[in-house]
Image (cartoon, grey):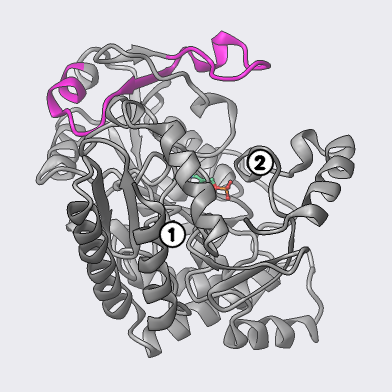
Amino acid sequence: MVDLSKSKEMFETARKYLPGGVSSPVRAIKPYPFYTKEASGSHITDVDGNSYIDYCLAYGPAMLGHANPVLREAIEKQLDKGWIYGTPTEIEFSLAERIASIYPSIDMLRLVSTGTEATMSAIRAARGFTGKNKFIKIEGGFHGAHDAVLVKAGSGASTHGKPDSLGIPEDFTKHTLQTPFNDIEAMADLITSSDDIAAVILEPVMGNIGPVLPEEGYLQEVRKLTEENDVLLIFDEVITGFRLAMGGAQEYYGVTPDLTTLGKIIGGGLPIGVFGGKREIIEMISPSGSVYQAGTFSGHPLSVAAGHATLDLMKEENVHSKLNATGDMVRSRLSEIVADKKLDYTVSGVSSMFKIFFGDKPLNYQDVLKCDKEGYFQFFHKMLDAGVFLPPSQFETNFLSTAHTEEDLENTFEAYEQCLQ
Ligand SMILES: *Cc1c(COP(=O)(O)O)cnc(C)c1O
């Protein structure tokens, strides 16, 4: 067992001042989380001096490794010029221009500070543009922590919105409709059930319950259905954008949404969010239109500078073909380990996202709920003891970064061999 005594002590103090001792609930690990001292490359080191190979990677952003020296240099260069202005800059619109050239579905965009803001604003833009009130999300889909998307998952085919948190009036979620992933008939029934539906928002690969992958043709069918019914399609690519390919899941699967949200990776580890899409929709955003949206830290110079450097580095180093190949290798090695041990587990993933489900291959949220969550959590702790930091839940995807070495991967497979049973 690794010694976590300093973390334990810190937790006792932290929980007096921060709810649960953390700044975001996913970071709370029972009985207490490790508190981080530093991170570099593929490794994260805690205050007790334990170093772990990191497959959590801050839940996605650190795709080029922790403390990447190229990103660091770009951030330092920007620091010399000041780091907050409250006035527009060239690096903002040039980053927008670059993103638009990578995502053919994006003519225009707005830079914001988080993925939460991006999805909140994309949904507002969709409602403003269509003049309709309702939207459809996928059960178990995560789009940040704003009122309209924090809706309980039901167990029926399609459910109407009940808030999944105290403090959200039911009135605020009554326009949020839900349907299961990978069920095109349920989607068709729901989409045609009302003429007040502005948009469908979905994660093309469900990253916050897995990864759970779209079945062949599902995204294409959703695109067709939305088009036929005058409903906008929003791809929430806060995880998959710049991950599956430069142009995200829409490039990878060849499906073009009307609106896209991005975040995580494109800030190079600094806070960022992006929403963008068709010109006629995004032009409705204030000040050019009447859909209000604003933010003091939007287009933050440090995040934007790190975003440019991220794009440079990804292109120069051909990051996606390399990482996607590593992902294939990792999934096949893990599948061999699972098969050797005769476990009824499922290795899932795409590109540089992977996960072992403690159960059958899931197609949607209800399937994932059937997995052995408690068993998974015990396995997580064993892996931590073996020096590998996986996200602490059956519901979070593992990520690869360009900083993971062959040696890291071999050590990781060995840990899986040891810890899986
Ligand atoms: C992380 C995430 C968000 C929220 O982004 P924040 O920057 O944490 O606000 C939204 N959508 C998806 C798919 C995410 O994974």
Percent position of residue 276, x then y: 43, 54
- Magenta range: 161-189
| Badge 1 amino acid | Met
Residue 297 locus on image (x, y percent)? 72, 57
Disc 1, SS: strand
| Residue plotted at (19% across, 34% down) | 182
The numbered mark at residue 108 is 1
Q: Earlier in the sequence, mark 2 or mark 1?
A: 2
Q: Is residue 395 above or below residue 256?
A: above
Q: Is residue 339 above or below residue 40?
A: above
The x, y position of residue 92, in whole percent, is 59, 71
Q: Label 2 crowding class (10 Å Cα cut-off): few <14, some 14-19, many 20+? A: some
Q: Quadrant of residue 305?
A: bottom right
Q: Is mark 1 within 8 Å of ligand 1?
A: no
Whole-percent x and y of residue 84?
A: 79, 68
**In this rendering, does residue 258 appear at all?**
no
Q: Is residue 124 left or right of residue 29?
A: left
Disc 2 designates what residue?
28
Q: Nearer the viewer, mark 2 or mark 1?
A: 2
Residue at point 89%, 38% (across, down): 17
Q: Is residue 180 magenta?
A: yes
- The quadrant the N terminus occupies is bottom right
Q: Marks 2 and 1, Cα distance to the nearest angstrom? A: 37 Å
Q: Is residue 16 visible?
A: yes
Residue drawn at x 14%, y 43% is 215
What residue is drawn where x is 45% and y is 53%? 238
Frontmost residue, 190 versus 285: 190
